[in-house]
């Protein structure tokens, strides 16, 4: 069998020693041969996503912590190289949760064959978990109506870039928040946002107010922190807030307070936290619609690709600080 | 025409001079004779409700401020004493928004005839605005399932008392929060709450935790402040929070912060502010169901009755501090 390389979670972050690449350890061993019903997948791309930071902790969260000493969890696309499962043949392209490693063994559960036509790594992005996350928040929580304004944090990220385009497809106005002029320019020129505000701008509150002169009707929140508090000041009556992530603050335990819940009463708004893995029943519909948009050229996206498994830990922590630009991938082949 | 007495809003509260009875002024004048299409109603009861405090302010809120120099807004029940409107006859019992006065002139809009059978003042309580408020939050936002636990603040108040009983009728567990042992005892013995916790208890957080050993699935929030923050620590996954009022804090501008919105993400919960007057389309269904419960003896309530219009300002501010016990009314006849 081929030689495998994998990152295991070797230690957890603590108050004294914050999270960093040192928490991961690279191990090498021969890939396991598939047993009855199993397949071996050679991974082409690993997806790096903010939720992984939460899994590094031992505390109570919505998900089980990543066990120490085991291969770090992660979405992967690749090609079947050995199969003892009748549903998969050698050469099939598949998407699954193979983890931070070159080869993944699977019993076929949670492994899906992907259709030709789109680049393989799109199944980790706009037609993968980030895309479904965007689809769920936009269609099931915000439900933008034509003429409304929806504000999107992390506007050029893997989720946010799809959110903005789905909002536009619904006939609403999409306004982004992103870090730096380059991302903001891309949001408008390539992703179709009507405007994008740089949260690093010293006049961010004033710039945001100018960008949404009629207030907002929806907010897709990925980040938290001060930009979130400013966004909450722009709510119109009957706003819907899809709370998808708090990457700027929460993973290290820094809270994102809401200074006064009265804003939700005065505007009769709805703030809803969601995790897309709770809603598996809508995935087929979501993926079908997203694949249709991609095939028709209605969805664009951008990727940050780190080269080689060894680059994963650094790329992951850079992404948490906003260092990526678009969907963060690791190319493994 | 008979002599009328009315309270007008004479001044607004300010940071220097907080809200109090001094903001109202009693005026006497002859009641107006009904013009074509109008009716004159002799009020029997005036309803005192927390929303009125918000109307005293000039600031931006969900409602228009009460104009200075005009009769203070308020729900009333009474009897038609003169009519030039074919829909109403002298002697009809009606519910409307007649304001803080003995006699109200109406063009018939917003005036409803009430059926005999229930005490007239019930149309300001369990089969009036407070009842519909409870019905909306329970049925349209919390939607309790059998076996779930719903926590209710201001558990013995005009709204809360109906909330608790509707939760029980849905087959769920109802746990109240109220101020003082007398209200808590009444909540359990008369309103059917499974438990009630005194928010004045020095060990309130521990008592609350004991009262909801399996956490909560729903929260009907009328009050805000520290009890709200403690309640938010008890959320189970997929909780629904109906944010109906923030009487303890907000009317005087004291904020009710949420220390970390992450709790809504980790529990994938929904927090929704609502005002029952936004949802006029559901009132007929709500009133019909509530009247059915009252007629069948399934809804109990308690009243605090102040005697005479002159007592209204004192009774109103006492209510805002929790001095009432049940629905606060002013008897005008």
Image: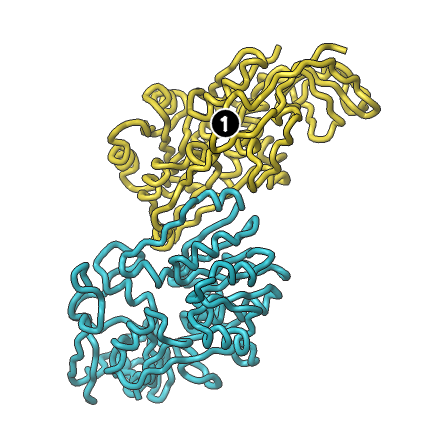
Chain colours: A cyan, B yellow
Q: Residue furthest front?
A: B16
**Residue shown at 70% from the left, 20% from the top:** B104
Quadrant of the image containing the C terminus of chain A: bottom left
Residue B111 rendering spot, x and y as whole percentages: 69, 27
Letter of the chain that mark 1 sits on in the rendering:
B
Q: Is residue A133 visible?
A: no
Residue at left offset 63%, top offset 29%: B68
Percent x, y for residue A138? 51, 62
Q: Is residue B204 above or below residue A10?
A: above
Residue at 33 percent across and 69 percent down: it is A321
Vertical position of residue B70 compared to residue A20: above or below: above
In front here: B318 or A115? B318
Kindly indicate the quadrant of the structure image that contains residue B35.
top right
Category of crowding for the residue at label 1, using alpha-carbon neighbours closer than 10 angstroms: few (below 14), some (14–19), many (at least 20) = some
Q: Is residue B258 visible?
A: yes
Pointer 1: what residue? B19
């Amino acid at each position: 069998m081929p030689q495998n390389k994998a990152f295991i979670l070797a230690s957890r972050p603590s108050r004294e020693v914050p999270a960093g690449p040192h928490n991961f350890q690279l191990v090498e061993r021969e890939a396991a041969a598939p047993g009855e019903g199993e397949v071996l997948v050679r991974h082409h791309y690993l997806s790096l996503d903010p939720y992984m930071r939460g899994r590094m902790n031992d505390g109570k969260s919505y998900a089980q912590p990543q066990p120490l000493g085991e291969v770090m969890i992660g979405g992967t696309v690749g090609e079947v190289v050995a199969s003892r499962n009748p549903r998969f043949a050698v050469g099939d392209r598949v998407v699954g949760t193979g983890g931070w490693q070159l080869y993944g063994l699977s019993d076929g559960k949670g492994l899906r064959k992907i259709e030709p036509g789109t680049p393989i790594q799109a199944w980790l992005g706009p037609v993968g978990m980030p895309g479904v996350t965007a689809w769920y928040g936009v269609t099931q929580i915000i439900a933008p109506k034509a003429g409304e304004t929806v504000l999107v944090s992390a506007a050029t990220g893997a989720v946010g870039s799809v959110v903005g385009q789905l909002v536009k497809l619904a006939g609403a106005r999409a306004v982004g928040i992103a870090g730096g002029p380059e991302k903001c320019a891309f949001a408008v020129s390539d992703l179709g946002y009507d405007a994008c505000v740089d949260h690093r701008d010293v006049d961010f509150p004033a710039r945001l107010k100018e960008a949404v002169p009629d207030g907002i009707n929806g907010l897709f929140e990925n980040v938290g922190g001060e930009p979130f508090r400013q966004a909450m000041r722009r709510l119109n009556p009957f706003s819907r807030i899809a709370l998808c992530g708090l990457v700027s603050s929460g993973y290290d335990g820094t809270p994102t307070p809401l200074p006064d819940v009265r804003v939700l009463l005065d505007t009769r708004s709805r703030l809803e936290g969601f995790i897309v893995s709770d809603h598996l029943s809508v995935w087929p519909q979501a993926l079908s619609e997203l694949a249709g948009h991609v095939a028709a050229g209605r969805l664009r996206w951008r990727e940050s690709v780190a080269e080689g498994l060894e680059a994963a830990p650094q790329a992951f922590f850079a992404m948490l600080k906003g260092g990526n630009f678009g969907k963060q991938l690791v190319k493994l082949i």
